[in-house]
Image (tube, helix red, strand yellow):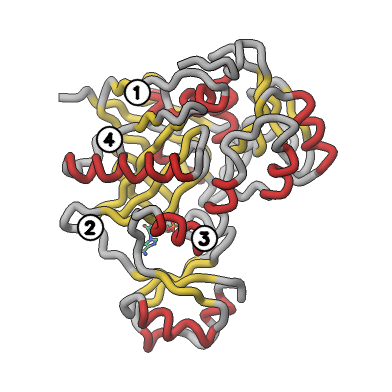
Amino acid sequence: MTTERSLSAGATIGIIGGGQLGRMLAMAAARLGFHTIVLDPAAAAPAAQVADAQIIAAYDNVTALGELAQRCDVVTYEFENVPVDGVARLDGRVPVRPAPLALEVAQDRLVEKDFLNDLGIATAPYRIVDAQADIEGAVEAVGGRAILKTRRLGYDGKGQLRIDDVASIGSNAFAELGSVPAIAEGFVDFEAEISVICARGVDGECAVFDPARNVHRDGILATSTVPAGVSAATVEAARAAAENLATALDYVGVLGLELFVLGDGSILANEFAPRVHNSGHWTEAVCVPDQFEQHIRAIAGLSLPTPHRTSDCEMTNLIGDDVVDMATLLAEPGAMVHLYGKAEARPGRKMGHVTRVHPSD
Ligand code: AMP
């Protein structure tokens, strides 16, 4: 449903963060006739290469945020570690979607897990770790096998330490984490990891993509496969959890919820991202609309049709030197290649992705 608050073609969308997610958002926005202005401290950031303009400044630069508010009709963000204070300062001057509550919850694993459990969305057991002395008791309380995770600023498996048993806890484990507030999370012997991408509009309606099955390597997403090969009941539980979360956050935009699937088909939430998600990149090849367009539609107050998926597929991240042999990838039938415009292919750096399209049965 298009509302009276919806933006028309020609309006300008501000994007805080200039990485590949911002780049794909800017491309989707352009397709719908919108202009985009990217705020990022790095000149010629991936998103800035395809946006109308870039404001080169830190994410919390008050003058830059003021300029963004003044030049844009709505502001969004493409990563979850945007300083909440800066975004909150924009609120009231220009609509900020999603609202800062989603950032506050997602930026702290403890707050996030409490929030999920309060909604009835189960997670692995967890305990607070504020000092080395807390670790043993916390690991025992969550079942004896655990992953220590910093509460803030962890991503792609960074800020994590695996503990296989209490006896193996190193005397400097807390220091290895950076001596910052952390949690011990019970180790989950999952059958599969899946994620579900959910769009929610200003009118509260949700549109959810089919879940993807995700495989991580060295803590970084390697592949996302659709369909996920889980039961209809698991798909339904995943959808319901994502809608429940989006509604509780009064969310406007796209979020990604990562889940563990257990042997009996039940799910535990791992974490959510208040933004478009790497495990939803496949949607650009086989869904109308894709996750990027859904996000733009949502924040612009436009209608959110149920995504129509035209094919099965598998998305593979191109990490570091994976992009060296482009000729082979480009010669492959049914492979949609997407590069992010990053000059230097460092190890572990996401350089692009390829989605291999397989006709559905
Ligand atoms: P995260 O940064 O929390 O998403 O963790 C990165 C990856 O580590 C996840 O995608 C899982 O593959 C693995 N992992 C994280 N938490 C757990 C857990 N509690 N039990 C088992 N594996 C986990």
Q: Position of residue 49 (x, y in %)?
A: 66, 26
Query: Is residue 189 left or right of 133 when viewed as pictured?
Result: left
- Give the image quadrant in which the ligand numbered 1 is located: bottom left
Residue corresponding to mark 1: 306
- Of the numbered discs 4 and 3, the one sitting upstream in the chain is 3
Residue corresponding to mark 2: 262
Disc 3 versus disc 1: distance between alpha carbons? 31 Å
Residue corresponding to mark 3: 111
Is 44 above or below relative to 257?
Answer: above
The image quarter in which residue 4 lies: top right
Q: Nearer the viewer, residue 5 or 252?
A: 5
Q: Nearer the viewer, residue 278 or 111?
A: 111
Q: From the viewer's perspective, is the residue at label 4 or at label 3 nearer?
A: 3
Q: Quadrant of the N terminus?
A: top left
Determine if the C-beta at disc 4 is less than 8 A from ligand 1.
no
- Of the numbered discs 4 and 1, the one sitting upstream in the chain is 4
Amino acid type at image mark 2 = Leu
Q: Nearer the viewer, residue 346 or 162?
A: 162
Residue corresponding to mark 4: 226
Amino acid type at image mark 4 = Val
Disc 1 versus disc 2: distance between alpha carbons? 28 Å
Q: Do we see residue 79 in this rendering?
A: yes
- Of the numbered discs 3 and 1, the one sitting upstream in the chain is 3
Q: From the viewer's perspective, is the residue at label 3 or at label 2 nearer?
A: 3
